[in-house]
Amino acid sequence: MSGKPSSVDFFGLALAAWLSFAGPLQAAPARPAPPLPAPSGTIVNVSTESQLRAAVSSLTSNRTIVMAPGTYHLLDALYVNGTFTNVGIRGATGNSDDVVLVGSGVANASVPFGIWVGGNVQGITIANLTIRDVFYHPIILNAGTQSPLLHNVHLINAGQQFIKSNPNPTGGGVDNGIVEYAIIEYDTTSRDDYTNGVDVHTGRNWIIRHNLFRNIRAPQGQLAGPAILMWNASSGTIAEGNTFINCQREIAFGLIERTPNDHTGGMVRNNFVYRAASIAGDAAIGVFDSPNTQVLHNTVLMSGTYGSAIEYRFVNATGVLITNNLLDGAILARDGASGVVAGNVTSASPAMFLDPAAGDLRLKATASAAIDRVAVVANCQTDWEGDSRPQGPAADVGADEYRLSAAPPPPLNLRIAGS
Ligand SMILES: [Ca+2]
Ligand SMILES: [Ca+2]
């Protein structure tokens, strides 16, 4: 065959070029989500709610339930409860909106959860699906669960927290969780102030990356919880490459003063935070009773909704490092917290960014207050979209490293269903 390539060829070339640039697990926007490897073990295919419920009830180790595209109106929560290793529930396609689990609404307790996990579950994958309109939590993980992977899920309208991870009474909890390429959002607002996007109690070494949190906010006059809340003796969390649009509080490592410390260590890096001026809120990034936590290269444009963009707080919050962040608010130490604050710029303005209201806080070429201003720091050598630092003579302040190459930027598709 000769002549001009077809439009399919052009699409394929563009996709291949983008994948070769970004790599399948470095693309930072929540969509498109990179595909997971095929499940290992037995696959059980289902296409109706009753088949799904039966498959969950008879789950065994090394088994993945694969759901055909469609809408599944839940009659109750799906309870994954037993002693299992390597299990999964996935939609059959790479599009999280092809498989939709629907509850009975945030005001109706007949469907309390979407997927409930507990007992003794070592390694569960929940992927490629939407869960919406349940009374409490679309996904709830209870102690006894370890190493959950939540990938390419779309969670809409929860009565309380969207992803809830509970402790046990003896200081244990769910460890090694990964939440990636999720979209977590309210159509408008939460039911009341008792909500978070991801709420982990007593979890160690979680990774929360490349997610989009949108409208995690309470009704007028109320203050929702942080979109990401890691606390109650959690440790080692990495929150990176996430995008937040119109939430009231975005990331909190620890929340209150308690013993043992509410959180320890971990990193908050390369996140984009945007709030419209009408969104009444609180600090975007909080390091509260969390020693040795690093806050590196985040971009926060909060439009005057609160005075401080980053706060660190309480006497046990020692050794905190806050560096190279691009903010339109202050960095505030409270109640005896201590650490190193360097290389930050607190004079960000909307004109510096490509499309702030869509959550695209990549720099324009004219953003001279941010571009080529700082040295590359350890633990932050790539940016929000996977570009290496530095481009040009020095690194840029904030989550985006302005790209010098002539290659077109990767597709941004943050405005998908629900917007
Ligand atoms: Ca640069
Ligand atoms: Ca970049």
Image (cartoon, helix red, strand yellow):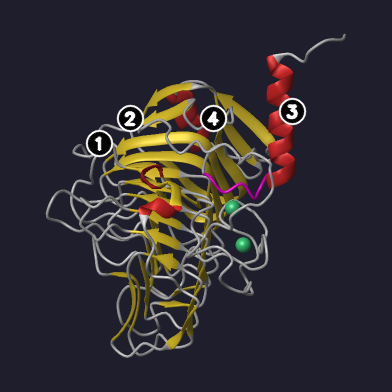
Looking at the rendered structure, the secondary structure element under dot 3 is helix
Which of disc 1 and disc 2 is earlier in sequence?
2
Q: Say which residue label 4 marks.
A: 95
10 Å crowding of disc 1: few (<14), some (14-19), many (20+): some
Q: How far separated are the C-alphas under marks 1 and 3?
A: 48 Å
The residue at which mark 3 appears reads as 13
Which callout, 1 or 3, points at the residue further toward the start of the chain? 3
Disc marking residue 75: 2
Q: Nearer the viewer, mark 2 or mark 4?
A: 4
Residue 41 seen in render: no
Between 35 and 122, which is closer to the camera in this rendering? Answer: 35
Q: CA distance from mark 2 to mark 1?
A: 7 Å
Q: Quadrant of residue 330?
A: bottom left
Q: CA distance from mark 3 to mark 2?
A: 45 Å
Three-letter amino acid code of the residue under disc 4 = Asn
Determine if the magenta segment contains residue 176. no
Residue at 32% x, 52% y is 161
First in sequence: mark 2 vs mark 4: 2
The type of residue carrying mark 2 is: Leu
Which stretch appears magenta?
Answer: 23-29
Pointer 3 or 2: first along the chain: 3
| Proximity of marks 2 and 1: CB atoms separated by less than 8 Å | yes
* Secondary element type, mark 2: loop
Residue lying furthest right in this view? 1
